[in-house]
Structures are given as C-alpha cells and as structure tokens.
Amino acid sequence: MKDHSPTNSDEISGNREGEIEASSEVVPAVSAPHGKRRSKAEVASQENRGRLREELHDRKVEQLRQMFDRHKGTRQLILLQDFPDPDALSSAWTYKLIAEQYDILCEIIYAGALSHQENIALVKLTGLPLQRWTLETVKTKDLSVFQGCAFIDNQGTTCNLTEYILAAGVPIAAVIDHHNLQGEMNAEFTDLRPQIRATATIFAEYLQAGLLTLDASVSLHIKCATALMHGLRSDTNALRQAQEEDFLAAAYLSRFYDPQLLNAVLQSSRSKWVMDAIERSLKHRTVQNNFSIAGIGYLRYDDRDSIPQAADFLVTEENVHTAVVYAIVHDKDEEIEVVIGSLRTNKLTLDPDEFIKEAFGQDAQGRFFGGGRSQAGGFEIPVGFLSGGNENSDYARLKWEVFDDQIKQKLLHLISPKDNPVYDH
C-alpha cells in the first residue's frame, strides 16, 4: 500500500452554512495595516469560520477521548511511514503518552530506516521509543495481542507493514494526519486536516485540550514537547510556511520545550552519504524552466534520506524554484529495489501532490505512486521484475539508464520542454 485515509465527514472546508450575507457597511479591522477596513460580512465570516473550526476541534477531541476509553487496558501498534520524519516521530510519541493515561500500551514501529542525521539525533537525544520491524520481523510477531493500530502522520500507504498488520485482523483504532486523503480506511477515529501544516500541530491541540497535561518539571514531557516543536518546525520550514494554528501550537509548546536540546538536534552533522548524494545531484542535474531534475543512481536502503536532503540543496540554486531528486534504492536484506524520489519547491502555485500524481499516475490497484503536501512531495516506484542482477555492472548501468530516462521523460512532459532548450551540467 501507499500513503493516507477515510473521508472525514466533519471536515468544514468549503462549509458556508450560517455565513452572514454581505453588507455595504464596514468596520475597522484591528489587524489590518495602514487603516484598511473590512466589511462586517468579512469580519463575521471569519469569526464564523473560527467558531466552526473550534467546534470541529472540540468534537474531535471528545471522539478521540471516547475511543481511548473504549480501548482501556489494551495494546496498540502505532505505524509510521517507512522513513519517519520528525513530525511523525514526535506525533507518534505524543499519541503513546496520551494513550498511557488510559492504560493503553503502545509500540511505535516502522519498516524502513532512520538515515537523516536530525532524525537519528532526535531519537538518541530524547530517548524516543521506536522499534524497527522488517517484513521478516513482523512475520515472527504474535499480532493477536494487539487490539488496535494507529496510523500517525500517514494513512498506511507509505508503510510496508500495513498489509501484514491489517491481514492479521488488527483493527484500525485511529488515523491522524495532515496530508490529503489517500484512500478509504475503516478507522474507529479519524482526524485528517490537510489545511494544517504539521501533524504535530494537531497533537499540540490535543495537549492543550487536556488529553495530557504537560508538566515542565517532568523530563519526559520536556523531551516530548521538544520533539513536537522540532516536528512542527520541520514541516513548516522553520515556521516560514506556518499558519495560525501552527503558530498557536508553537506558542503553547514554547512553555515546555528545551531550546538547548532542540539546538543539539538541529546541529547534527551531515553524513558522508548525504554529501555524496548532494555531489551526485549537482553533477547530474538537468535544469529547464526553473526545474532542476537529478537522477543520482543507486543508493543503499539505509541512505534513502539523502534524497530529500539533496533536493533541499538543489532548490536553493539561483533561478530554480523546483527540484526533483531520485535514485534506485536497494535493500539487500529484503532483496527489493524501488525508485524513490523527492520534490521540493518554492513556487506557491505548484501543488506537489497534483504534480507528482499527474507525472507518475497509479499502479494496477489504483494506488498513486506518490503525493505531497505544501512545497514538498515524494514518490516510490517498485522496480519489480528488473530488481537485482546488479553484480553485472553493464546490466546495472543499462537498468539505471532506462529508469532515469523514463522518469525524466514523465517530468519533462509536465514542464513543457518545447518552450526552452534543456541544458545539462
């Protein structure tokens, strides 16, 4: 499977019920600069949307509380995407701590790798409880002891464990995510908010609502708040893309997080593998119409997080607003290969989710090969029958050239290559 979950009937996006009719009268806008004034209808509409948002939030908190009540004294699995980021890690930890208030024992699991230096530092410095379950590991587990599972910052589509957990009959207790809906999931509780920049923001709101009372004198609470602040900061580009809810969440967390601990996480050094990926992306990039596209060959599975870091670097180039970096990632233990790519963009009118889905489409089961959120996205395309055989250097080179050309062709088709000539570096 690949990433996300069920329709949220409580979603208020586009809900205009109860909005007040337009009026020609205007009132001073407290926050409007240079004396600009808004109509009464604009002010009332904004207040109404705020009230509806608060009602939705209160309803969700109560539904989550009821779900935990029903599961008291049980065990749950928290499933993360294969390569969990700070937002996923911190949100999952918060879910676990909240669940403990209801005597629910949770295990946080993922199937891939922690290779980004900040993720490794976050887990080590905070003691974040995390377990790696490979596909072989999950087959040895007695899954009957778990009465529920939760998908946090994903909807099951970017987690290789999803199929096995659900096939074992473990019901979905919760799906909590800030990405767009990816597909139907029969979850007991669902909170999907694509209008919010980080899942950490949603969990900060849960904390504010009293699902867990943070105490600044409790070391565990300080570390969790620091992790949440890092997750929020990471998914909002250091708050530069933050919206009102994100700023409010950051303000709340500022009372509990440890700035020195967060600084230690952020100052972790880039690995040799990341520097090598950046070097290869610079060498092989193709720039057209302000897009920078780079295929960087083969990578070890454990170094997969160097791909988004290379994309982060390429998008900083002058006259480039969007960067796409991809590689064939091979896992010798599982004997699988997959093309993995990351997109980063500074162009506000480019929707990474739509762009990636249009570029690469769906598999035979109708699942998209990738998607995204504001200013970032990713894709995974199985190599399938062509996996392996890389001991033969000529075969490995030919295989890479085929995938490299095909991916570039699909991307350049959207970028309108006829407008400007391609130039290679």
Image: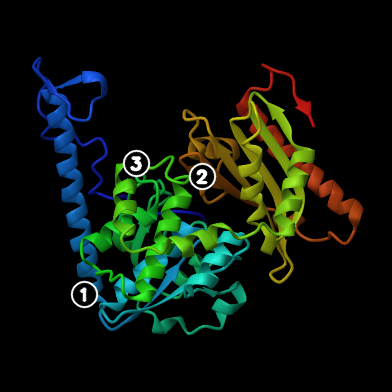
First in sequence: mark 1 or mark 2?
1
- Note whether residue 54 is visible: yes
Q: How far apart are marks 2 and 3 (CA)?
A: 21 Å
Q: Mark 2 vs mark 3: give the one in front.
A: 3
Between 270 and 423, which is closer to the camera in this rendering?
270
Element type at mark 1: helix
Element type at mark 3: loop
Element type at mark 2: strand
**Corner quadrant of residue 401:** top right
Q: Is 243 above or below relative to 207? A: above
Task: Tell me the residue that label 2 is attached to.
Answer: 371
The residue under the point 30% across, 42% down is 244
The residue under the point 23% across, 67% down is 211
The residue under the point 69% across, 69% down is 334
Task: Tell me the residue that label 3 is attached to.
Answer: 243
The residue under the point 40% across, 84% down is 145
First in sequence: mark 3 or mark 1?
1
Task: Tell me the residue that label 1 is attached to.
Answer: 69
**Residue 381, image x and y in percent?**
63, 50
The kind of residue tagged 2 is Gly
Q: Mark 3 vs mark 1: give the one in front.
A: 3
